[in-house]
Amino acid sequence: MRALSFAALIVGVVLLPTALGLAKADHARDVSQVERMLVAETEEHGGALDNYFTRARSVVLLTANSPAFANVLAEPGTRDEKIRRQGRNIAEATHHLRYLEQLYPTSIGEACFINARGEEFARVVRGEVADRRDLSTTEEQTPFFRPTFALRFGQVHQTKPYVSPDTKEWVVANATLVPQADGHKRAFVHFEVTIESFRRAMGLTDSAELRVVDASTGRVVIDAQHPQAVGARLGVPSDHSFAGLAGNGRKSGVTKVAGRLTAYRRIASTSGNANDWLVVATARSAQQGFVAGMGVVPLAMLVLAVLMILFGGASSRAARRELEGHASTDGLTGLGNRRKLLADLERWVRHARADDPVVVILFDLNGFKNYNDTFGHQAGDALLTRLGAALAEAVAPYGGLAYRPGGDEFCVIAYAAKQASVEQAACRALSESGDGFSVSAAFGSAVIPGDAVDPSEAMRKADEAMYAQKHSGRATAGRQSSDVLVRALAERHPGLGDHQDGVAELVADVARRAGIEGEALAQVCHAAALHDVGKVAIPDAIINKPGPLDDEEWAFMRRHTIIGERIIGAAPALSGAARLVRASHEAFDGSGYPDALAGDDIPLGARIIAICDAFDAMISDRPYCLRKTTDEALAELSRCAGSQFDPAVVRLFEQVMAERRAVPTAADVVD
């Protein structure tokens, strides 16, 4: 009995913290679910408000760009004379203001056309046109007048909320200048969008309480649950719960407000928008402590003590092994991932001796980028899976372990006594060819402790050796300078790495076909790898813009070839490449940039780069368009031959692509 009591006590002592831990984990999971739900609500409803602001800006810009407004300003006579005439231009401008009510039904209170002296040409209130005798001449006192005339053409000013003098509702005004050919600011168009329409645009949810909070004061501007009544104060003036969010400067986050979980997200900041708002989603109830939610679980665990310990221990170990397996395994090939590689290498290094060294071998696939572009990502993934399985099988007889650190790189750790055999077996395993493709592997090795004494140094030495082999021996000064710039560009814009590699491979093949040899060929290859280096000076917002660029953005983008020339020209060994980069966006018909060169005035290397760059861009996914197939891209090059591209170089490019597709399979060679 004593032994039984002692055993029961031990079980109770052991299970008590276990029960608390389980309860705490459940509580943490519940909190995490609530946080994810709240963040999702702020994203959804904040996005709705972002879109509402954006739509208002677009509508006022489109309205102001109607020729009717500029035509009114261009008419002879004074403002009073134009109003008295009520000519066609005034009527058309008024029609555009009335049309705004149809775009925003029940949301627009007032729309106006106002000149630089604060005089109204036309005003529409809730779809009703104001009598010309009621038009105001003192609009310079409004909150939007001065800020609007401080804008550049094409910009929009969106005011903080104020009470409309016509509708008595809380509104946000949107105003923009009427474009003028001579650049003088003569008038603007504006309309008021009600705060209540913002509340409706944001929407409701049953899972949380939604509000819009002023980011600088913490004051509630919009409460999604309560309409903004005419004549009432803005938002919920008595709610000071969110004062702690004021001025924190963060774009988003999760915190607690009055004991309830709260997520917030800043409305996208745009030039001219005077509102700095946070969309806030608050849980409808406070989270209970994990102890309060335990119930009778500890008692049940005491009753089932022994079974629970056995089951819990076994299941915990199994789950841990599964998690460790997922954390250390490449999901595509099933090989060890980079984390597993570094952990295993650390252990191998500790046991490596001078008389029993270890070798680490890095492999990089040649031709995989073209395979991916030609056959698609699914085929590329299947190829990586096959090569990974073949690699693991090939090195296993030598005691080697295979890994996939990422991308098209593989790695092997083995005993150095079998180094040559492992390298040969691995290279055979990582090679595959077929109809239209040929994939092989470049590799580099580092022996421990001979070449390196720690894992980081070993990986670096192997990486250097691999790239030295990949680029055919010891790098020249030009190659070294080129590599530095390519890596700098990859750090600034990681997405351009594959594009650079693809263009460089194509350019090398076409340049050889065109008879370019020796140092001239090297300079063309450097230029191909560096043709986008000038984009390090282009803002991310322009590089990654999903839609078409405006004129100002295009002007900025077209500077990248000149910037690239300056950057590359700083290395004397790359002076030839610098000139080619400058000319890489010239067009055969003279319509290109930056120097409007035409025909043979454009260096041959630059004409080759232009075609290969365009082809690789067309077969790659871009933020602003979907990829084309290889045949579609070739057809587009043919269509633009003689205008954008040199027809002779296009024919050479087509020959190179035909040869790539005609590479015989291993079966064909045997037959």
Image: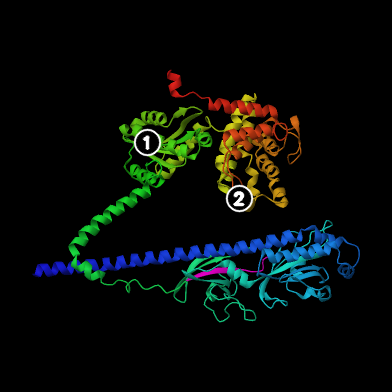
Left or right: 92 as drawn, with respect to 213: right
* Image vertical order of residue 573 relative to residue 286, above or below: above
**What label does residue 503 carry, if any?**
none
Q: Which residue is rendered at x = 61% and y = 50% of the image?
A: 546
Report the residue at 45% width, 20% height from top.
669
Three-letter code, disc 1: Ala
- Cα distance, mark 1 to mark 2? 37 Å
Neighbor class of circle 1 (other Cα within 10 Å; few <14, some 14-19, many 20+) is some
Quickly name the residue at label 1. Answer: 389
Q: Is residue 268 visible?
A: no
* Quadrant (top left/top right/bottom left/bottom right) for the C terminus: top left
Amino acid type at mark 2: Asn
Which circle marks residue 544 in the picture? 2
Q: Which of the 4 image quarters holds residue 670?
A: top left
Residue neighbourhood size for the residue with mark 2, other residues' Cα within 10 Å, grouped as few (<14), some (14–19), many (≥20) = few
Instruction: Assign a secondary structure to mark 2.
Output: loop
Q: Residue at x 47, y 34 (%)?
A: 365
Residue 627 percent coordinates (x, y): 58, 41
The quadrant holding residue 449 is: top left
User: In the orientation shown, which residue stands out farthest toward the left?
Assistant: 1
Residue 323 lies, with reference to residue 120, above or below; the image says: above
Question: Which is more N-terminal, label 2 or label 1?
Answer: 1
Which region of the structure is painted magenta?
Answer: 272-282
Is residue 553 visible in the rendered image? The answer is yes
Residue 354 shown left or right of residue 66 in the figure: left
Q: Is residue 2 left or right of residue 338?
A: left
273 is within the stretch colored magenta: yes
381 lies left or right of 356: right
Give 493 or 369, whichever is nearer the viewer.
369
Secondary structure, mark 1, is helix
